[in-house]
Image (cartoon, helix red, strand yellow):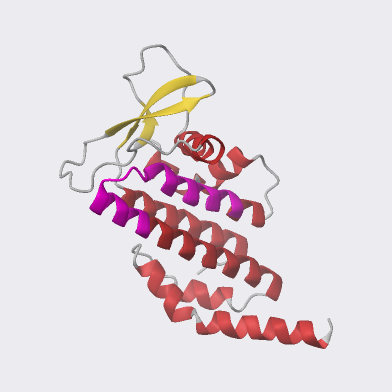
Amino acid sequence: MNEPEKKWQESQTSGWKNDKNEIVGFFKRFDLEISDLYNHIISLDYTRMQVICYLLSKIRKAVKICDFLDTLERESNEDVDAIKIFFLISHAEITMDNFGLPDSKGELVNKFFESVAEKLKYKIKTSLGNETKIKEISFSDILYKIRCEYAHKGNHTGKIFKNRKTKHNDTKNLFLFKDGNKDIFGECGLTYQEFANIYIEALTNNIKKFSGYTG
């Protein structure tokens, strides 16, 4: 390693160490305490530390964008759920790719959510309201199909998440998504914030696995 590269790595590492309080505070917003995990991250070799810290920077930016979209929804009644899903599911895909998994994009998303599957599979699913018999589509496939609809066709219309003002836990929001050329009805029993909490939990679990954290 030449001297400029060494100084660059030392500068980045110092910056990541100084970011600890801000990053720990970000995760507390999602009811997660990662102080010990972050200490572990900044003790890793530079290569693994860089991968994780870059992903942490990306998720913080994605959540800021989603916060802005929340404001548009709240103040102007804008349809923003599919755009939120696009940013988060794209980040899930990037995370698992950076962690070295060789799978297809859809499978990367599926593996990202493996540790929290029980919290999502009954909350995001195909609806009994579909008129014709359809094959079962997993919650991760539904999320990935919504992400692709926005990415490839610009389709961002329709509310997906449950209204945050709804008081009943068993209330679900009905939404429409595409499976190929077929229109499919889905059901979501989560608010955006509930989904975001589960998403960040999955991200944390994947970081622990990649970094070898056992605390």
Q: Is residue 16 visible?
A: yes
Magenta span of residues: 67-94
Tally the marks: 0
Query: Which residue corresponds to the image point at 50% horizontal and 69% vertical from the top-left?
Result: 215
Query: Image quadrant of residue 29?
Result: bottom left
Position in image of residue 132 (x %, y %): 40, 11
Query: Image quadrant of residue 48?
Result: bottom right
Image: 59 above or below 76? below
Image: 13 above or below 98? below
Farthest residue to the front: give it: 76
| Magenta segment main secondary structure | helix
Q: Is residue 52 left or right of residue 22?
A: right
Q: In front: 2, or 40?
A: 2
Query: Image quadrant of residue 33?
Result: bottom left
Position in image of residue 83 (x %, y %): 43, 46
Q: Is residue 212 visible?
A: no
**Quadrant where the N terminus is found in the figure:** bottom right
Farthest residue to the right: give it: 2
Q: Is residue 147 left or right of residue 170?
A: right
Query: Which residue corresponds to the image point at 59% horizontal and 67% vertical from the top-left?
Result: 54
Image: 214 above or below 176? below
Q: In front: 61, or 22?
A: 61
Query: Which residue corresponds to the image point at 47% horizontal and 26% vertical from the top-left?
Result: 178
Q: Can residue 71 be found in the magenta stretch?
A: yes
Q: Is residue 51 left or right of residue 26?
A: right
Query: Which residue corresponds to the image point at 59% horizontal and 38% vertical from the top-left?
Result: 106
Q: Can residue 180 be found in the magenta stretch?
A: no
Position in image of residue 189 (x %, y %): 29, 38
Q: In front: 74, or 133?
A: 74
